[in-house]
Amino acid sequence: MSEASLLADDYDATMAEVIALAKSCSDEDWRTLCPKEERTVGVLFDHIATGNPQVITWVDTFLAGKPVEITPESLAAQNAEHAHKTAKRPRHQTIGDLDSSTPRTSAAIRALDEDQLRKSQQFGWAGRQDVGWVASAAVRHPRGHLKSIREALGR
Protein backbone atom coordinates (compact mmCIF):
# COMPACT_ATOMS: atom_id res chain seq x y z
CA MET A 1 0.00 0.00 0.00
CA SER A 2 1.31 3.46 -0.87
CA GLU A 3 2.24 6.08 1.69
CA ALA A 4 -0.56 8.32 0.39
CA SER A 5 -3.12 5.52 0.81
CA LEU A 6 -1.97 4.88 4.37
CA LEU A 7 -2.17 8.58 5.17
CA ALA A 8 -5.64 8.82 3.60
CA ASP A 9 -6.79 5.79 5.61
CA ASP A 10 -5.52 7.43 8.81
CA TYR A 11 -7.28 10.64 7.83
CA ASP A 12 -10.53 8.78 7.10
CA ALA A 13 -10.44 7.06 10.50
CA THR A 14 -9.72 10.33 12.31
CA MET A 15 -12.49 12.17 10.51
CA ALA A 16 -14.94 9.32 11.17
CA GLU A 17 -14.30 9.90 14.89
CA VAL A 18 -14.70 13.67 14.49
CA ILE A 19 -17.96 13.36 12.57
CA ALA A 20 -19.42 10.73 14.91
CA LEU A 21 -18.69 12.92 17.92
CA ALA A 22 -20.05 16.04 16.19
CA LYS A 23 -23.27 14.23 15.33
CA SER A 24 -23.64 12.97 18.90
CA CYS A 25 -23.43 16.46 20.42
CA SER A 26 -26.45 18.20 21.86
CA ASP A 27 -27.02 21.93 21.40
CA GLU A 28 -25.65 22.39 24.92
CA ASP A 29 -22.53 20.37 24.05
CA TRP A 30 -22.07 22.53 20.94
CA ARG A 31 -21.86 25.67 23.11
CA THR A 32 -19.42 24.16 25.64
CA LEU A 33 -16.17 26.08 25.92
CA CYS A 34 -12.95 24.15 25.35
CA PRO A 35 -10.74 25.90 27.92
CA LYS A 36 -7.41 25.01 26.30
CA GLU A 37 -8.61 26.39 22.98
CA GLU A 38 -10.74 29.32 24.20
CA ARG A 39 -13.33 28.35 21.58
CA THR A 40 -16.54 26.40 21.83
CA VAL A 41 -17.01 22.81 20.70
CA GLY A 42 -19.08 23.99 17.72
CA VAL A 43 -16.49 26.52 16.62
CA LEU A 44 -13.77 23.85 16.83
CA PHE A 45 -15.77 21.40 14.74
CA ASP A 46 -16.30 24.16 12.16
CA HIS A 47 -12.59 24.97 12.33
CA ILE A 48 -11.81 21.33 11.53
CA ALA A 49 -14.22 21.44 8.58
CA THR A 50 -12.52 24.54 7.16
CA GLY A 51 -9.09 23.01 7.80
CA ASN A 52 -9.76 20.10 5.45
CA PRO A 53 -9.71 22.12 2.22
CA GLN A 54 -7.00 24.41 3.63
CA VAL A 55 -4.57 21.48 3.85
CA ILE A 56 -5.23 20.63 0.20
CA THR A 57 -4.65 24.27 -0.77
CA TRP A 58 -1.28 24.11 1.00
CA VAL A 59 -0.42 20.83 -0.77
CA ASP A 60 -1.32 22.39 -4.12
CA THR A 61 0.85 25.42 -3.28
CA PHE A 62 3.82 23.13 -2.60
CA LEU A 63 3.19 21.14 -5.77
CA ALA A 64 3.21 24.43 -7.71
CA GLY A 65 6.70 25.07 -6.30
CA LYS A 66 5.63 27.93 -4.05
CA PRO A 67 6.12 28.35 -0.30
CA VAL A 68 3.23 28.62 2.15
CA GLU A 69 3.64 32.04 3.67
CA ILE A 70 2.07 31.91 7.08
CA THR A 71 3.12 33.09 10.51
CA PRO A 72 1.88 32.11 13.95
CA GLU A 73 0.39 35.60 14.21
CA SER A 74 -1.48 35.43 10.90
CA LEU A 75 -2.78 31.97 11.77
CA ALA A 76 -3.98 33.20 15.19
CA ALA A 77 -5.72 36.14 13.53
CA GLN A 78 -7.43 33.83 11.00
CA ASN A 79 -8.56 31.54 13.82
CA ALA A 80 -9.93 34.45 15.84
CA GLU A 81 -11.83 35.80 12.84
CA HIS A 82 -13.22 32.34 12.11
CA ALA A 83 -14.35 31.90 15.73
CA HIS A 84 -16.14 35.25 15.64
CA LYS A 85 -17.88 34.50 12.32
CA THR A 86 -19.00 30.99 13.23
CA ALA A 87 -19.90 31.39 16.91
CA LYS A 88 -23.63 31.01 16.18
CA ARG A 89 -23.45 28.86 13.06
CA PRO A 90 -26.08 26.12 13.12
CA ARG A 91 -24.77 22.70 14.01
CA HIS A 92 -26.31 21.04 10.93
CA GLN A 93 -24.34 23.37 8.62
CA THR A 94 -21.02 22.51 10.25
CA ILE A 95 -21.82 18.80 10.20
CA GLY A 96 -22.76 19.15 6.52
CA ASP A 97 -19.38 20.77 5.83
CA LEU A 98 -17.58 17.98 7.69
CA ASP A 99 -19.53 15.38 5.70
CA SER A 100 -18.81 17.05 2.36
CA SER A 101 -15.19 18.15 2.83
CA THR A 102 -13.93 14.86 4.25
CA PRO A 103 -14.27 12.70 1.12
CA ARG A 104 -12.78 15.42 -1.10
CA THR A 105 -9.77 15.80 1.19
CA SER A 106 -9.34 12.04 1.43
CA ALA A 107 -9.41 11.67 -2.35
CA ALA A 108 -6.87 14.46 -2.80
CA ILE A 109 -4.48 12.86 -0.31
CA ARG A 110 -4.96 9.38 -1.81
CA ALA A 111 -4.18 10.73 -5.30
CA LEU A 112 -0.69 11.91 -4.34
CA ASP A 113 2.15 9.84 -5.75
CA GLU A 114 5.49 9.14 -4.09
CA ASP A 115 7.33 11.85 -6.06
CA GLN A 116 4.72 14.44 -5.09
CA LEU A 117 4.92 13.46 -1.42
CA ARG A 118 8.68 14.15 -1.48
CA LYS A 119 8.46 17.63 -3.04
CA SER A 120 9.58 20.19 -0.50
CA GLN A 121 9.18 23.87 0.07
CA GLN A 122 9.15 26.41 2.89
CA PHE A 123 6.15 26.25 5.18
CA GLY A 124 6.03 29.44 7.21
CA TRP A 125 7.64 29.13 10.62
CA ALA A 126 7.96 25.34 10.28
CA GLY A 127 10.78 25.69 7.75
CA ARG A 128 11.38 23.38 4.83
CA GLN A 129 8.88 20.52 4.75
CA ASP A 130 7.68 18.03 2.18
CA VAL A 131 4.19 17.48 0.81
CA GLY A 132 3.81 14.36 2.98
CA TRP A 133 4.27 16.48 6.10
CA VAL A 134 1.79 19.07 4.85
CA ALA A 135 -0.78 16.41 3.93
CA SER A 136 -0.37 14.77 7.34
CA ALA A 137 -1.64 18.02 8.90
CA ALA A 138 -5.05 16.75 7.77
CA VAL A 139 -4.64 14.12 10.50
CA ARG A 140 -2.66 16.04 13.13
CA HIS A 141 -4.95 19.05 13.09
CA PRO A 142 -8.30 17.35 13.80
CA ARG A 143 -6.73 14.93 16.29
CA GLY A 144 -5.46 17.79 18.43
CA HIS A 145 -8.82 19.54 18.42
CA LEU A 146 -10.70 16.28 18.97
CA LYS A 147 -8.68 15.74 22.14
CA SER A 148 -9.67 19.21 23.42
CA ILE A 149 -13.31 18.64 22.53
CA ARG A 150 -13.39 15.27 24.31
CA GLU A 151 -11.77 16.78 27.41
CA ALA A 152 -14.27 19.66 27.49
CA LEU A 153 -17.21 17.27 27.10
CA GLY A 154 -15.78 14.64 29.47
CA ARG A 155 -15.96 11.93 26.80
Image (tube, helix red, strand yellow):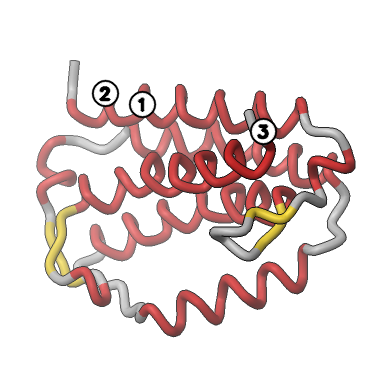
* Marking on residue 6: 2
Marks 1 and 2 sit apart, C-alpha to C-alpha, by: 6 Å
Asked whether the beta carbons under mark 1 and mark 2 sit within 8 Å of each other, the answer is: yes
Amino acid type shown at disc 1: Asp
Quadrant containing the C terminus in the rendered view: top right
Write the residue at 39% across / 39% down: 139
How many labels sit on residues? 3
**Horizontal placement of 107 versus 40: left or right?**
left
* Marking on residue 99: 3
**Label 1 belongs to which residue?**
10
Outermost residue, top direction?
1
Quadrant containing the N terminus in the rendered view: top left
Amino acid type shown at disc 3: Asp
**Which secondary structure, mark 3?**
helix
Write the residue at 43% across / 84% down: 73
**Which secondary structure, mark 2?**
helix
Q: Name which quarter of the figure residue 126 lies in.
A: bottom left
99 or 113: which is nearer to us? 99
**Horizontal placement of 1 versus 148: left or right?**
left
